[in-house]
Amino acid sequence: MANSSSITHFLLLPFPGTRQLQLLHFCLFLAIYLAALLGNGLIITTIAWDHHLHTPMYFFLLNLALLDLCAISTTVPKSMDNSLRDTRDISYTDCVLQFFFFIFLISAEYFLLTTMSYDRYVAICRPLHYETLLGSRVCLHLAAAVWACGVLTALLHTANTFSLPLCQGNVVEQFFCEIPQILKLSCSTSYLREIWLLVFSVCFFFVCFVLIVVSYVQIFRAVLRIPSQHGRHKAFVTCLPHLAVVSLFLITTFFAHLKPSSISSPSLDLGVSVMYSVVPPAVNPLIYSLRNQELKAALSHLIAGCLHKQ
């Protein structure tokens, strides 16, 4: 039995199998990580470089790419390093930092997706008031609120979780430090405070979910009233990538944290955590770039400009 004061490191869940399978995991995570770095990096660079993309929609998309880039950098490099060195160790300090930044970035991304649904609602349902309701100052304030809410959420959960006495050893049954796995290490009577904080967070996130649903109900009602087929198509094209990203994020996150304990297993938990923490940051740039002609055109001009300078 150990307590939190005596724990100097945690043992993360290893990827099972032979040494060859561990190296395969390293190569797979490396490929996903490089894809996420390339995709999100190109989106950030393109939006920052092309002044035609300095609009609220692309400003929020730039923030999303930045959050995705930071989120995948919080968990994947450490897992790759452990696989390469055939170890499971993560220091207590590194675990706390990883826990904090992951909660911060995931929470901020959820708040940002809610803000982006409001942006699409105003653009389609109230286009004449778009510049007024989403001016540059309003966008900056919304983005600042998103990041601040993410920091506050992470601070509350990190301080609360790691203040609990840890009496169940130091084995974290996940490839990174997350709330459910750290709570499993706490004493049986000491985690109720964190449970209440989780309930409050779930209620707050549910409000955001309702806002997203209401926004898209209004959006689809407005789109279906557009008389021309071309107008409907253009409106759908601007909304579908965001809706796809929201769906991927919510489905994987909700299943990871709300699945019945009866079907839980280390291999299933590992697969689900990969789906919600690793896959979305790599896939989101692809979703946004496939149907966005403005972004693809700006990216082509950026690449052509770089090749021309060479």
Image (tube, rainbow, N blue to C red):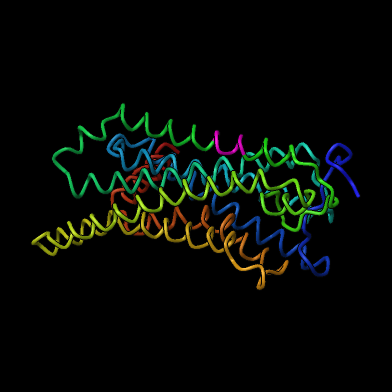
Q: Is residue 12 above or below residue 95?
A: below
Percent position of residue 179, x then y: 66, 49
Between residue 116 and residue 58, name the one nearer to us.
116
97 in the magenta segment: no
Answer with the quarter of the image where residue 217 lies: bottom left
Residue at horizontal 89%, vertical 39%?
Answer: 6
Between residue 76 and residue 100, name the one nearer to us.
100
Percent position of residue 212, x then y: 35, 52
> Which portion, as a residue range, is magenta?
151-156
Percent position of residue 283, x then y: 49, 58
Between residue 186 and residue 270, name the one nearer to us.
186
Answer with the quarter of the image where residue 92 lies: top right
Percent position of residue 264, x then y: 68, 69
Specify the farthest residue to the front. 189
Answer with the quarter of the image where residue 278 lies: bottom right
Residue at horizontal 12%, vertical 59%?
Answer: 226
Q: Is residue 184 above or below residue 24?
A: above
Relative placement, left or right, of 239 versus 287 is left
